[in-house]
Amino acid sequence: MADGDEKRSGTFAIPASTFYKKNPLKSFKRQEYIVIEEFPESSEEECGDSSSDEDWIPEQKGASRVARSSSDSDERDEAQEEEYEGQGEESEAHAAEDESQEEDEAEEAENSPPPRAQGKKAKGKGVRNIWKVMDNEFGGDLPTFLGESQMNVEGRDPIDFFSHLFTQEMIDNIVFNTNLYAFQKVHENLGLTSEEFKTFLGMNMVMSYIRYPRARMYWSSEQGLHLDLVANAMTINRFEKIMRYVHFVDNYSIDPENADRFVKIRSFLNALQGTFSASLDPEEYQSVDEMMIPFKGCLSIKQYVPKKPKPWGVKVWVRAGSSGYMYSFEPYQGPSGGRGEISQLGMAGDVVMRLCEDLQDRNHKVFFDNFFCTIPLLQALKHQGIFGTGTCRKNRLHGAQEKLKTEKQLKKEGRGSVSVVTSTQNITVTRWMDSSVIHMASSCSGVSPTDEAERWSKKEKKMLKVQRPFAVKLYNQHMGGVDQMDQMVAAYPHRRRNKRWYIRVFFHLVDIAVVNAWFLYRMSGNEAKDLLHFKASTARALINAGSVTIRSRGRPSAIPPPLKRRAVVKVPPEVRYAAGNHWPKLNVTNAMRCSDESCRRRTKYICLQCVVFVCPDCFANFHFRR
């Protein structure tokens, strides 16, 4: 070997035999580890956490080793070899102790809710769920409902039910802030009154079920476009001026540091939610889902949900009964906006807990989809006396998938095959094979009693009868409350274009209030009316309550305008019995039969407000409700 190769810069050539004599290879020692049964809960939201492993590694007990530095390891090699022989017996003893601790911890978990440590990175020790291949303990006999679904509204006409939800106090507050905003904006005295705002509200209701492409068409002079119900109630200029200045809060009273993104309309939202929950006691079966308020303007909290009929808009979390009545709602403000810190249940779980605050300890049954459903959420609801059921994603089963049959096994068994496991806290996970695999998690239902459901087979081109678990049947029956409300609102929506997002939110909630009032009207046992007639009746009553006399421009005509006749029997009760200008007026045309049912005479007198023929002697009897 050349000298240059033997001596390089900073290196020395050492024969291999000499190196291994001085540093003999040490044999690797066999090491045993004790399985730690308690471990921190993990979720999908924490997968991207940048914290180190030292934050969650549990301490080992008994014969478990403590980490030490490399300098100390050389000094304790000999002592470690002596201890190795006795470690096998100790590890077996610890394994037996850990199994007994599992059962004790599971029993303690039944009487305590899951940890809800506050903070964006909430962490804590979670109890391992022990799953057994068995059905739910209730076996189809649901827990007895301890509440009473009672209606707290009385009335005969549609306007009575709507006025109970959309109260006079709300109207007065909107009128005050609207006048204040008009003065702050252009120093103009708008002079809006509560009666005039009711007319404005009723006109917008009419525009929701009689739709024109442009708002000014309702006041058009062309034949076939002019709508008397709207045009005779208010001028177009006054209507547009009120729409321009509608406001719900004093802008100068808003704190610049306020993180609430719905502060522009927060007072109205709180008042409306209070009347919704107070008018009807919660039903036994409730559902939690999302709702979209259509809006495509500039807004930071605007959401895009591609599978919705109106994908762009403001997202709202809603709790509704199985009848479709909306009890509670919460507008979505972004990942962390307006609601404080997130608990261990996650953002979606916290939404369910907030919406169900008034359902505690009455054995309500709440249903939600796989966006909300987790095993810890079902445990937290059960601790508050609420039983939850929902579809669950397969990565949220918390170990239940280890005891369930695999998807391949269920596919081999065919459509309708099922596998079920239940935890020690009576949380049941059901894996059912339909056209695809479905996971149901519930604290009150499982497989039995099963029933048959009809499904279409693409291969055989016919309907098949498939065995269906009880949890799936229960979910399909009571999950559609929010969807039913969406369907009713979408039938006659107020969708006038407006760049201000809070105006769109306001009129959408007015439509919801009309639908809720319609549900209450049907529950009260009054005369059957569909939603269209109910909304039309409410709109007429609001317009009549604040009707404005319109003065025509120019000189008064010498020839009186022809009388607009109405069918005698078609006078709406909201107009006939409402307070107003019920005065007799002599008509110069031919006499007509009196509109009072008990009178058969002919008269030339008409009622100025009802615009029907009524004898002067019959005025009191005709306008008095029995």
Image (cartoon, grey):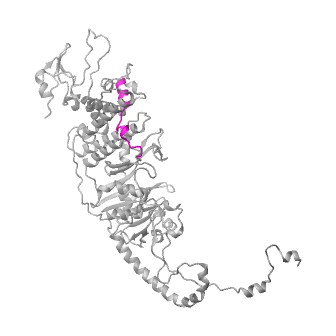
| Magenta segment boundaries in residue numbering | 236-257
Image x and y of residue 166, in percent? 28, 40
Viewer-side residue, 78 vs 606: 78
Viewer-side residue, 433 vs 521: 521
Q: Is residue 442 above or below residue 157?
A: below
Residue 579 is one of the magenta-drawn residues? no
Q: Quadrant of the N terminus?
A: bottom right
Image x and y of residue 180, in percent? 33, 32
The image quadrant that residue 516 belongs to is top left
Quick check: 370 left or right of 274?
Answer: right
Viewer-side residue, 367 vs 375: 375
Q: What's the residue at 45%, 75% (across, down)?
A: 37
Quick check: 548 left or right of 25?
Answer: left
Q: Is residue 11 above or below residue 118?
A: below
Q: Is residue 112 above or below residue 455?
A: below
Say how many tags the image has. 0
Q: Residue furthest top?
A: 558
Image x and y of residue 551, in percent? 29, 18
The image quadrant that residue 236 belongs to is top left
Residue 358 in view: yes
The image quadrant that residue 603 belongs to is top left
Image x and y of residue 113, in percent? 35, 66
Residue 210 in view: no
Q: Quadrant of the C terminus?
A: top left
Quick check: 44 left or right of 244?
Answer: right
